[in-house]
Image (cartoon, rainbow, N blue to C red):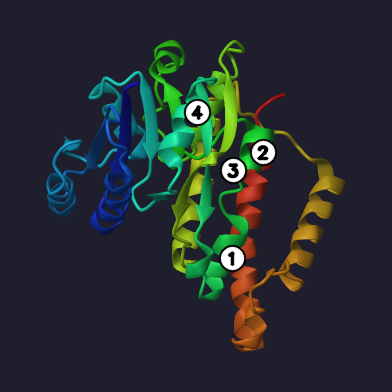
Amino acid sequence: MKWSIIIPCGDDAEGLAKTLDSITGLWPAGFAGEVLVVNDGAHAAVGDVANRYGHPVRQTLLTENRGSYAARNAGIAATTGPHIAFVDAGCWLREDWFAGAETAIADADYVAGDVITERGLCTTLGRKYSCLIEFNVRRFFEEDRFGPTANVLVRRTLIDEVGPFDAALRSGGDREFGTRIEQFPHLRKVFAPGVAVFHEPRTLAQMIRKERRVIQGFKSLKQRHPDTYRHRSAGAAGTIGFVARRVWQILRPPPLGGYAHPLTSFGAWTALRLYALIWFMKINNAVLARAVRVDD
C-alpha cells in the first residue's frame, strides 16, 4: 500500500515542523509512502523546514498564496499514491494514526478522521472555548457528511471520479467536497475516531479570525454553488426563537466541564464581554450556515 500524505502550508513554519516531527517520528518501518509539503506562497522559512527532513519528505511550491484547497489540489497532482491523506500544518498525529489509517481505508473510499483539541494547552479563556466548541467531527460527519481536511483520507480513485477540491474557495471546501461525494452513493464514507490528530487550541484572536473566514466561506459556497446551497427562510417565529436562545447562551455560558470557571480568574465584566464576543461570532456563523444548508 502506498500513501501520499499532503500538507498544505502557508506562512507557518513552526506548525509545519511540529507536524513533520510527528509524522517522521511515528513513521513505521517499511511503510511505503511519501510526504509532500505544498508551500503555498513559496515562503522561505517553510521551505527551510521542509528541506531539513529528507526522504520521505519533499516540497512543491505555489509562488502565490492561493489558499489551502488550491494547495491540496496541487499536492494531488504532484503525488502518485493510490491512498491520500490530508493533514494540516500545526497538527500532530496520535501514536496509532498509521495503523488506524490503513485499517480505515481498507473498507472505505473517504475517511473523516478525528481532530482532538489538546486540552492540556487550554490555559486561557479563548483556548478553553476553543476546546469546547471546535472540531466536533462526529457531528460534522453525521449531519453534513464531511470531515475537516485537517485529517481526511481518500482513495485517489475517488478524486478521479468526483474531482478535486474547489480551488476558488478559501473556506468551506471540505464541506463542498463532502457534499459532492454524496452524489455518488456507491462511494463509501466513514467517520474513523481511531484515526486521530491533535490540534492546538486557538486563542481568542485566532478564533475570531477563523469565524470571519468561515462566514466568508458560507457566502462563497452560496455564490459558487447556488443549486446546492440555497437560502431557507426560518420565518419570523423561528428567527426570534433562534436569536433568543443565542442571547441566553451569552448570558448563561455552557459549562466548562473539568475546567475552572473563567469567572473565578477573570473580572466578571471582562469575562462576560469575552463570552458575548465569542458567541456573537458563533451566531453569525450559525445563521449563515442555516441560510446555505445543503438541501436534503
> Which mark sits nearer the N-terminus, 1 or 3?
1
Query: Does residue 273 sit above or below 131 in this rendering?
Result: below
Where is mark 1, residue-wise? 129
Please identify the quadrant where the N terminus is shown. Answer: top left
Q: Position of residue 201 (x, y in %)?
A: 48, 62
> Which mark sits nearer the N-terminus, 3 or 2?
3
**Gap in angstroms between the C-alphas marked 4 and 2:** 37 Å
Where is mark 2, residue-wise? 291
Where is mark 4, residue-wise? 103
Labels 1 and 2 touching (C-beta < 8 A): no
> Which mark sits nearer the N-terminus, 4 or 3?
4
Residue drawn at the location 60% of the way across and 23% of the way down: 228
For the residue marked with disc 1, what is the amino acid? Answer: Tyr
Q: Nearer the viewer, mark 4 or mark 1?
A: 4
The secondary structure type at the circle numbered 1 is helix
Q: Is residue 111 visible?
A: yes
> Which mark sits nearer the N-terminus, 4 or 1?
4
For the residue marked with disc 4, what is the amino acid? Answer: Thr
Q: Is residue 226 visible?
A: no
Q: Position of residue 25 (x, y in %)?
A: 29, 49
In this rendering, position of residue 18 left or right of residue 54: right
For the residue marked with disc 3, what is the amino acid? Answer: Val
